[in-house]
Image (tube, rainbow, N blue to C red):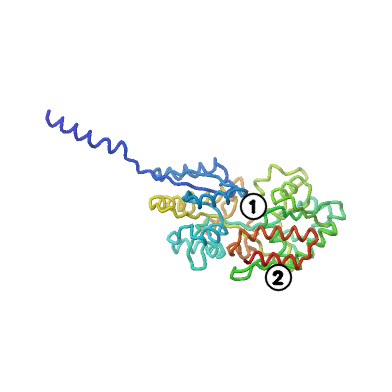
Amino acid sequence: MKKLVALLLCLMLVLPVFAFADDTVEITLWTYPIGSWGNAETVDGIIASFNAVHPEIKVTVQYLDYTSGDDQVTTAIEAKTTPDIIMEGPERLVANWGAAGKMLDISDLWDDAVKADIIAASPAVEAACKNGEGIYYEYPLCMTTHCMVINYNDFEAAGALQYIDEATHTWTTEGFLNALDALNAAGYVPTAVVYCGGQGGDQGTRALVTNLYSGQFTNADHTAYTADSEENIKALQLLQTLVNEGKLDADPGIVAGDEIALFCNSTISMGFCWNASAAVSNKASLAEDVKVFPMAFPSDDGIPELQGGIWGFGLFDNGDDARVAAAKTFVKFVCDDPAQAAASVYASGFFPTRASLGDIYAGTDKAENGEYAIFMPFLGDYYQVTPNWAAQRTEWWNLLQRIFAGGDVAAEAAVYAQNANK
């Protein structure tokens, strides 16, 4: 009897320890709307797969948009309430918050095997995820090349298909100009709109300008913006002339999302902001007479350099080792786990930054996404890591507005360069 009492006393002392012990680590993920990574149902499924392997880590998600997201992050930085993980691109994770000392050095995630796999897919991705001292602030998941799009039906009816290379989805600047003439002559007006109401989709207008006469948006070492170069001024002058002649429209009141809607409802015959993800997300909104045909931007030599997008994960420095370890575990699972990595990229609608994953769209309901892989060899310089990136974006659409309001192109480009390169 004494032994039984003693045993019960021991259990009473031990049980509360087990009852209240909790090894769960809670972390937060903030994500911009990168394909279906902006969809709660999709992300909840990814987290459920993660928790099946790591039930000890609880992940809470907050969804950002590109209108107020940056302000939310800035406020969180100032209030020291930043999330453990944030999903976006190097222009924010490396060139902005990383350069400001707010992000964690995650170079330990980049082992030799990971590095080789990413470089095999695209050396530009590996280079963009680290700063000038070689410190990695981003662990990449997916990438794409942005392109433009034409309504194949309009081009066919206007006799303008002769000006594109249907096999390679490329065309020359001369072909672009001839196509505009053909579309206008056939009554397909407006042909296209150079949107400049804000920064939304500005990758399209930048690529349009730099490709027309083989210009570069920054210098080679990403220390200065070069929209005022001879080639870019020539391209901007051409666009101003086309607008003045009525062959193109320019609208200071819309951004890319509005332009995409105009293309999808058959108001315009081509759009300057498109990619694989846009093709999927806008499929249901296409008018019956719109046949999507993605195109590279026109270039004087017929060899485009396309603006790229890279998306992945960065970690804010919150000073909690347990949360940092948990955050790294989540990021590695999402990007590297053999059973999960392809699904994580699939959710984005873009392409893997790991060569080992191959074609993740074959045989899926997004099989058409694989067609956009034709543009990947045209991936150009990832210049979004140039300092003062956020301010430059405002300067860019302001530049376009001034030019299409009748401003002198060279003079306005000089103003842009002075302001962007502060």
Q: Left or right: where does residue 101 sit relative to residue 186?
A: left
When asked about the image quadrant of residue 38, the answer is top right
Which amino acid, by three-letter code, is at mark 2?
A: Ser
Residue underneath mark 2? 229
For label 2, count other residues whose C-alpha is less than 10 Å away and answer few (under 14), some (14-19) or many (20+).
some
- Tag 2 secondary structure: loop
Which residue is depicted at the point 53% across and 50% down?
75
Are the two marked residues, 2 and 1, in contact with CB atoms closer than 8 angstroms?
A: no
Which residue is depicted at the point 63% across and 67% down?
421
Could you tell me if residue 128 is visible in this image?
Answer: yes
When asked about the image quadrant of residue 287, the answer is top right
Q: Residue 278 at x, y = what percent? A: 66, 49
When asked about the image quadrant of residue 205, the answer is bottom right
Q: Earlier in the sequence, mark 2 or mark 1?
A: 2
Q: Is residue 168 above or below residue 39?
A: below
Residue underneath mark 1? 276
Q: Left or right: where does residue 18 sit relative to residue 416?
A: left
